[in-house]
Image (tube, coloured by chain):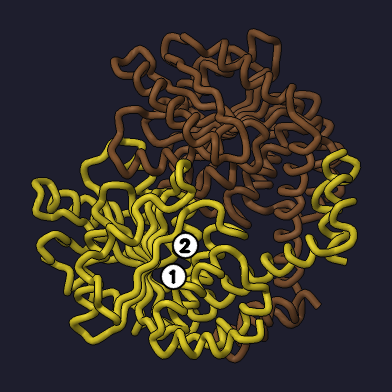
Chain colours: A brown, B yellow
Amino acid sequence: VPDLAARLRDVEAGDRRALARLLTELENGDLGADALGPLFAAGHDAHLVGITGPPGSGKSTLVNALVKAWREEGRRVGVIAIDPSSPLTGGAIMGDRIRMMDHAGDPDVFVRSMASRGALGGLAAATWLAAAALDAAGYDPVIIETVGAGQAEVEIASLAETTVVVEVPEMGDEVQAIKAGLLEVADLIVVNKSDRPGADRAARQLKAMLSTAGGRAARPAPPVVQTTATSGEGVAALREMIDQHRAQRTDAQVRERAANLLRRAVASRAQLRAAGSDDWESAVAAVADRTEDPFAAADRLLG
Amino acid sequence: VPDLAARLRDVEAGDRRALARLLTELENGDLGADALGPLFAAGHDAHLVGITGPPGSGKSTLVNALVKAWREEGRRVGVIAIDPSSPLTGGAIMGDRIRMMDHAGDPDVFVRSMASRGALGGLAAATWLAAAALDAAGYDPVIIETVGAGQAEVEIASLAETTVVVEVPEMGDEVQAIKAGLLEVADLIVVNKSDRPGADRAARQLKAMLSTAGGRAARPAPPVVQTTATSGEGVAALREMIDQHRAQRTDAQVRERAANLLRRAVASRAQLRAAGSDDWESAVAAVADRTEDPFAAADRLLG
């Protein structure tokens, strides 16, 4: 990628169009593997903040309010919003258009929607590259917002340094169970829509549940914060706690995160090498015919 | 794994306790990588059927009814149910206990619940191994049921040969959007709870939406089937369509699935090798210090 260094300088100098183009190329897999090294090298170690939770919890409104709080601190804020995909258009359903209307025209806020399917090498890999591009462009923090509930959130949480789980007190049993799974990845838990009746009780129940679970967990229970994103109530306190979580990171946490990133990079590079090898087609045929098991074939391809 | 061949013979001979123990060891990562080859070699090419959809769609009841329909055909049926995890117990919330009560005591039905977090190498890898074990034990079809909505379903769909998406007509906009994402991975779409008012309309809308989308999609629109799992209405027809989908598989589909499995195996073996290399610790430190980008470090580890 001959002109990548020059393009990264444009991106860093604030050229939004150059950044948008870079993100599209990363998402489509148009940039070769050689681009990834310079992209990561151009980073500034931005704080990656994951914000996740079940549908209907008001995540987008909360992200909007958090962006405002960080702007008041003079921070330049990047947002990657992972949206469900539309089968009709192939694109993200929510779209940049209808998001973050409050920050339209602010040159120090950059919002990108990504569709949750079709990303080359999986959603987590695509999100990671997009976050690296926003980091290279000088945005800090970079917020990753996910819609949905499940393994995707766990994967994306392993990219973020600080994971905020937004709660919905009102939902049914199966959603509650999914919610319980999300609590395990949370560094901070938000009970949003706290102007509603029952929110205080939901927050108390969560705290009780977490302190009971604390005895078994490998780490202390995450704090529970109440917000009302629509009015801004509690948002400044949440912003402060997110910043503190980063400030208090330990060497062991930095190392564990690096090990995660490295495991991911190893998988991605190995798949690229294997698919490019002369034996790839014959190995696929052997697995298809069941004359070789996939692991033996993988070992052969890796040499 | 010296006694694995003997254990696989026990499993195949119908020793349920041996199978349960094998599944636990696979889930915990207790069996080394050397076990994986023999496990896959012992398989019978069972039909893997993924059944997924948003919370509240009645998936478990439908799976229960489908098991009954396959039993009436004389098939031995395996079920892997991926459940959200509890932060309190660390285990799956729904549990084998409360599932599939109708088939308790039937030696030709085997049900296994797996927690959706903590699986070594990710949920998809753990599910894949469990499905291989049920295949080796002679269950066919093997049903993989997932709770939740998002990337996990897309990943699990790439394991299954036939993916059935169960719909919920009643839910809100954001859930509808997630649902739209799921439609893209569907080979068959079920509108369950079709005794409810509005179900016929929901099925018609889905068909219209899918035929509009058809022009852009790389494949024909999936059929829409209406069921009422609680009464059994439509379940025999659904079972028949799932079997037909397998019977009509093309060589290209078999190949594409083999390529998917092989890509996964390559990632898993490469990660194992990298983490076991003498340079792993220093590579993690270099990524943590930002003196090396993760992709360059990965290339170095892969040699």
Establish if A230 lies above or below B156.
Answer: above
What residue is at 52 percent from the left and 87 percent from the top? B42
Q: Which of A198 and A20 is in front in this view?
A: A198
Label 1 CA crowd tier, 10 Å (few <14, some 14–19, many 20+)? many
Quadrant (top left/top right/bottom left/bottom right) for the N terminus of chain B: bottom right
Image coordinates of residue A129 in percent, x first then y, are 69, 44
* Mark 2 and mark 1 residues within 8 Å of each other at the beta carbon: yes
- Give the residue type that dot 2 points to: Ile
The chain identifier of the residue carrying mark 1 reads B
The chain identifier of the residue carrying mark 2 reads B
- Give the residue type that dot 1 points to: Ala
Marks 2/1: CA distance?
Answer: 7 Å
Image coordinates of residue B209 in percent, x first then y, are 28, 52
User: Quick check: B269 left or right of B207?
Assistant: right
Q: Which of B173 and A24 is in front in this view?
A: B173
Q: Mark 1 points at which residue?
A: B160
Image coordinates of residue B235 in percent, x first then y, are 17, 69
Q: Mark 2 points at which residue?
A: B156
